[in-house]
Amino acid sequence: MAAAALVPDPSDKAAFDAAIVDPDSYAHEERYHAIFKTLRDEAPVYWCEPAGYRPFWTVARHADIIRVELDTDTFLNDPRLTLSSIADEERVKAMTGGSDKLTRNLVSMDNPDHRHFRSMTQGYFSAKHMRRLEDQIRTLARQSVDHMAALGGECDFAADVAIWFPLRVIMMTLGAPPEDEKFLMKITQEVFGAQDPDTMRPENVGGLFATIAEFNAWCDRITDDRKTNPRDDVSTIIANATLTDGSPMRNLEAMSYYLIIAAAGHDTTSSSSSAGMLELIRNPDEMAKLRADPSLLPNAVDEFIRWSSPVKHFFRTAARDTEVAGVKIKAGDGLVMAYPSANRDEAVFADPFAFRVDRAEARKHLAFGYGPHLCLGQHLAKMEIRILFEELFARFEGFELTGEPAWTRSSFVSGMKRMPIRYRARS
Ligand code: HEM
């Protein structure tokens, strides 16, 4: 298969392991999928020892990731969350005076804190409550489509549309004023784009630290305001919540909660929207199918998300000696759950490298994770992507690519940063 040309041979372990952690592998979909197809076929639970990183297991198959996600007593979110070089880990420790992270949020928590913090906003992000926001989200989608019309038939769909719309949706949930848009864009781009030259600050981890300090000041203002002027937004819930022991929410946890919502809800959704548009353009038969039968759109949205899998991994750490798929794991070992790999697993998805808007098993994707940490914003994400495409299809036709698309370079959350397209108003 093409894997040999795209990635080092696994017998050259140093080079193969370096490719697994190389952010460039995540900016080239074929390369990423060649690496992980090799792992699914030959070493589904694989000990990866890249130079400059603490070693870890990669878990490449759908069923094995579910097993890890469900056993939250054995596989902990704390302390190791995402791939980071030893040098970056040391820098974080030096800057925080010994702590291994800059924030403390849902994805870094285990029970009992995780259950408590998740229950604060679970109702707000439920499917039922999200339906109440549908009209507001449609208004924002129409503004994006109006902007596309004003651009005169050509735009960079990733940079001009897909990246702004989910940010505005998230700002609506947080109750952030429109004038904060540019600031929040910068923050969320820097948090996830820390490995990409287009978005990173000069000093990788140092830059992230500065980003979070700026965001901290913004959060203090919103928390103070919502304590005295409660509103119907998620910031009000967070600002007035209590910690597990009943004491008032602390600054670190409130800031971390706003940040996870803003960051997790932004680049992820925009990546799946861009990927959906790209694959529809590349697969005209799928585009035609969808336009002929708009009732396929909710399923198509799951296929966009399966296909793009914007979150490339999360870690778990084994709390005790255990096994995954017959492979012995020692207490303290880290495991990377490779979501995009699970979403091309032949055991679950028929012809997994084919993009099909009517794929029967599209909803089985693990792009939102699984189990107790399953993405809190999944209903919001799916609804906003569906609404955006409803509005795009109502206004335009004849979508085509006018240049090469480009992906961000990040082993954590990555997606498209450039996608020049042409389109015309529907006659
Ligand atoms: C296509 C869009 C999205 C994708 C692919 C995505 C993916 C993910 C993944 C993989 C996880 C980790 C799940 C696990 O550990 O099992 C997660 C968690 C989370 N996501 Fe999303 N997400 C998306 C959109 C959103 C949106 C719109 C929000 C806004 C609220 C959001 C908020 C969160 C939060 C707060 C968590 C932490 C949940 C927890 O640990 O309990 N996400 N997401």
Image (cartoon, rainbow, N blue to C red):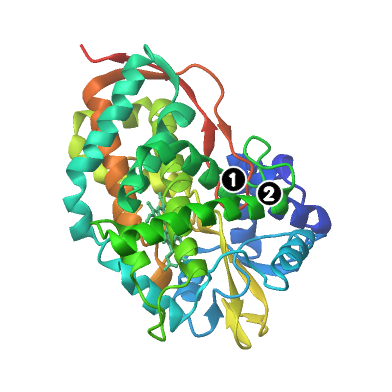
Residue under the point 18% across and 59% down: 128
The reply to whether callout 1 and callout 2 are in contact (CB within 8 Å) is yes
In the image, residue 281 sits, relative to residue 366, either above or below, namely above
Residue at mark 2: 207
- Rendering coords of residue 58 (x, y %): 63, 65
Question: In front: 186, or 267?
Answer: 186
Question: In front: 58, or 127?
Answer: 127
Residue under the point 23% across and 56% down: 232
Say which amino acid is labelled 2.
Answer: Gly
Q: Quadrant of residue 80?
A: bottom right
At numbered mark 1, what does the secondary structure look like: helix, strand or loop?
helix
Say which amino acid is labelled 1.
Answer: Glu
Q: Quadrant of residue 190?
A: top right
> If you read the primary sequence from the N terminus, does the residue marked by circle 1 or circle 2 appear first?
1
- Image label count: 2
Query: Visible in this render: residue 354?
Result: no
- Rendering coords of residue 167 (x, y %): 40, 42
Q: Residue furthest front?
A: 228
Q: Label 2 neighbourhood size at 10 Å, few (<14), some (14-19), many (20+)?
A: some
Residue under the point 76% across and 66% down: 94
Question: In front: 374, or 135?
Answer: 135
- Rendering coords of residue 39 (x, y %): 64, 59
Left or right: 70 in relation to 200? left
The N terminus is located in which quarter?
top right
Residue at mark 1: 190
